[in-house]
Amino acid sequence: MYKIIPVKPFDLILLGATGDLAMRQIFPALYRRFQVGQLPPGSRLVGAARSQLSTSRFRQCVRDAIRTHVLAEMQDHQSIGDFLKMVDYARLDATSSEDWKSLSAYVDPGRVTALYLSVRPGIFKNIITSLKEHRIVHDKFRIVVEKPFGFDLRSARQLNAALSAVFQESQIFRIDHYLGKETVQNLMALRFANVLFEPLWNSQYVDHVQITVAETLGVKGRGEYYQRAGALRDMVQNHLMQLLCLVAMEPPSRYLPDAVRDEKLKVIRALDTVQYDHIVRGQYIAGTETASFADDVNTPDSKTESFIALKCQVRNWRWAGTPFYMRTGKRMRCRMSEIAVVFRDPPHSIFGSKSVLKGNVLAIRLQPNEGIDMRLTIKEPGPGGMRLIDVPLDMSFARTLAVGSENLTNAYERLIMDVVRGDQTLFMRSDEVEAAWAWTDKVVETWNEHNLQPISYFPGSSGPDDSLMLLHRDNRRWREIVC
Ligand code: BG6
């Protein structure tokens, strides 16, 4: 099943190596790539953080992370041991010149060095300056930047300016892990490798598009960050915006980084300012066993949204008149992410007025059970006349491709290997990030002008009722959030 594109030995230096993302996602992803033979011998994986740790202690932490976050059937005692031999630890206090000098010993200009920043954004600039001062950067050097990429347009511009003072754009990899998800890439394959959909992919045939990213978790443990960010900045500015771009963009001439990113950028720039009555903010209250958002962020009078729903318009020839509805929230009924393209109703029914014909729906499921589902109307089998029913034409990737969903490459595995290969197709370019922030800032301005406060919703629900109204007013309804 696996097709591996070989890479030459490389060095990956991970700053923030003792943090949650490193342990939950990055090291488990690297281990999986090692296991399938994609980390060539001689590669080095160097964790760097402020804690004073020996390499053997750090390796133990990585071992525990693999034990916890890699599926049991994918773990193998021998291969974990071999993998850990590649792992090293370097203490790094970003303000210490001595520490930077020691770290530079791991940099070999003859091969790829990927420096992964999994640290709080406050120290990005400090790090970038130190890299320059200590002459650590070389031609094959790549920098990987995790979100949040700024807090608004101003801070994103400052960050881009700081990066471009030291790096070429081709060396900067701004991660949005949604772009690494299997189904997200499949959306491009579906649209541009089949002739079936593209002729219908416009406002003449598509009634509207729904993008939902619902999560069951709250924000406990990330309170400080989340109280400042909220759902709009945390999820919409990046993940949902990228999904919208992939649905709405024109076909790029080639599957090449700039060709794809040029088209995404045009979509973001074509997005209209969202009207105030097309924004619904929500905040979860306490449940029987869960704390309220205000308690989770430790701010009793918090006005931050843990849920947001928006109605957006892409002002171009293809999409004029087809709204894109987006919603995302924490502590919702289920963990479910999908893009649903809802087609218009057939213009006329030959089956008489009793048979109400419904528009087809193409749903692209990101999680759980990644796949594509198309709803078609057919005749109900058996006697009794021409009775019509709605049935799914379901394609679960795991089932159709006969792979366990655990074997579908996860986003971080794919994105880290893309960094090593130098392929930026699934990473955001500076102008894209800035355009997304420019649009986001206007949403914030609008809700401030109209004093839109978050509306309470129950944990385990689909968000505030007002978000249902957003579609009801247009004679439409959200698809159900089902597990
Ligand atoms: C992160 C957000 O970028 O994405 C989190 O900061 C969110 O708040 C997460 O929970 C969702 O990612 P996934 O892959 O679990 O859908």
Image (tube, grey):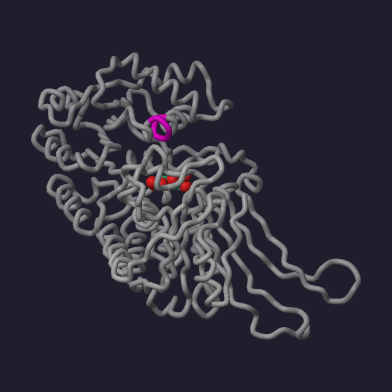
- Could you tell whether 281 is left or right of 477 in the image? left
Residues shaded magenta: 23-27
Identified at 54% across, 67% down, the residue is 468
Q: Give the camera-side residue of 474 and 354.
A: 474
Q: Using the rendered image of the protein, determine whether residue 285 is visible from the camera's viewpoint.
A: yes
Q: In which quarter of the image is residue 48?
A: top left
The residue depicted at 51 percent of the width and 58 percent of the height is 463
Q: Which quadrant of the figure contains the N terminus?
A: top right
Q: In which quarter of the image is residue 206?
A: bottom right
Q: Which residue lies furthest to the right in this view?
A: 383
- Find residue 75 and report its horizontal and vertical position in percent: 53, 24
**Image coordinates for residue 476, horizontal then vertical, percent:** 57, 73
On the question of residue 177 being in view, the answer is no
x and y, in percent, of residue 84 in the image: 39, 19
Q: Where is residue 130 in the image (x, y as percent from the top left)?
A: 12, 35
Q: In this view, does 311 lie above or below 258?
A: below
Residue lying at 55% horizontally and 30% vertically, measured from the top left: 71
Relative to 313, residue 405 above or below:
above
Q: Nearer the viewer, residue 86 or 232?
A: 232
Along the line of sight, which residue is nearer the eye, 104 or 53? Answer: 53
Query: Which residue is most to the front?
Result: 300
Residue 26 among magenta residues: yes
Extreme residue in the left direction? 133
**Would you say residue 232 sits in the magenta stretch?**
no
Position of residue 285 relative to residue 474, above or below, is above
Residue plotted at (44% across, 43% down): 411
For this view, does 369 lie left or right of residue 305? right
- Residue 316: image quadrant is bottom left
